[in-house]
């Protein structure tokens, strides 16, 4: 009859330890397998391998999770539409089997100026960028777009507003009330950048001095005023002697 000590937790733990010690290779392989499965699940949930062929392929969860999608800029279209090809971090699917990717991006909450369109052409065309989707439609993705400068990612939306190249898009009360949490967060940030740009008179906010318009009357007044001023200056100089 087995003793009560054989059924104790410490005895059971000792038996499990003995089995693991006698099958070191099996134990190691099982642990590697568990780690690999966990890694694959984490990668799948992160969106690093998700292939985006069009805007309809972007999961709605990418908006709430603030996922940044890596892509290559193919062209800058009219009205500043950024045409990109998705380039995932991990290309598990062979190139020949990968679906052709084409997504159209628009800078969210930015009223793009012609100068802003030129800035996009000069800065990000034919380069790798990242975008965070904020509003997904059938044809265009309203996005917070980033580009790498040195080792950091910088917000293009914020740069264009902060340098006074563009301004924040005007929204109706209905549009303001329907903004999602990520959109509202971006709007607050852009308004802060616009306020600073306005205070420091950057770009479009720079105050230009009005040029003096010379008319015959204003010219005569200026000559008389200058003559009188010069005469008073000479008179004051000689009166001191």
Image (cartoon, helix red, strand yellow):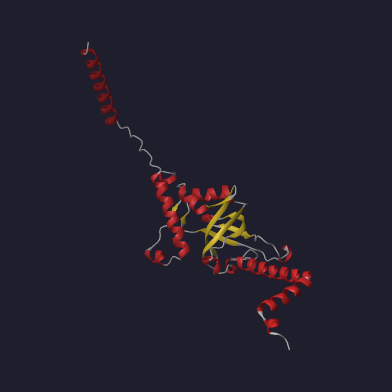
Furthest-top residue in this view: 241
118 or 33, which is in the foreground? 33
Q: Position of residue 74 (x, y in %)?
A: 62, 55
Res. 50 in view: no
Q: Residue at x 61, y 68 (%)?
A: 45
Whether residue 78 sits left or right of residue 176 in the image: it is right
Q: Position of residue 225 (x, y in %)?
A: 25, 25
227 lies above or below 85 = above
For the N terminus, the quadrant is bottom right
Corner quadrant of residue 101: bottom right
Whether residue 220 sits left or right of residue 84 in the image: it is left
Q: Position of residue 57 (x, y in %)?
A: 60, 68
109 or 23, which is in the foreground? 23
Tally of marks: 0
Q: Position of residue 48 (x, y in %)?
A: 63, 63
Res. 224 in view: yes
230 lies above or below 5 = above
180 or 7, which is in the foreground? 7
């Amino acid at each position: 009859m087995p003793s009560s000590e054989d059924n104790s937790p410490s005895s059971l733990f000792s038996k499990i330890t003995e089995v693991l010690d006698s099958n070191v290779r099996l134990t190691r392989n099982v642990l590697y397998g568990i780690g690999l499965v966990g890694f694959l699940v984490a990668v799948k949930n992160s969106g690093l391998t998700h292939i985006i062929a069009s805007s309809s392929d972007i999961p709605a969860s990418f908006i709430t999770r603030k996922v940044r999608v890596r892509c290559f800029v193919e062209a800058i279209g009219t009205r500043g539409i950024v045409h990109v090809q998705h380039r995932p971090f991990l290309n598990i699917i062979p190139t020949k089997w990968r679906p052709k990717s084409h997504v159209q991006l628009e800078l969210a909450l930015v009223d793009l100026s012609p100068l802003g369109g030129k800035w996009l052409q000069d800065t990000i065309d034919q380069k790798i960028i990242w975008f965070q989707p904020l509003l997904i439609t059938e044809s265009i993705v309203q996005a917070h777009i980033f580009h790498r400068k040195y080792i950091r990612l910088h917000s293009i939306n914020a740069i264009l507003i902060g340098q006074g190249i563009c301004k924040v898009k005007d929204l109706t009360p209905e549009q303001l009330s329907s903004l999602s949490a990520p959109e509202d967060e971006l709007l607050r940030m852009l308004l802060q950048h616009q306020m600073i740009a306005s205070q420091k008179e950057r770009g479009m906010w720079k105050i230009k001095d009005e040029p003096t318009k010379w008319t015959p009357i204003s010219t005569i007044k200026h000559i008389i005023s200058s003559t009188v001023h010069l005469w008073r200056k000479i008179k004051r100089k000689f009166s001191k002697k």
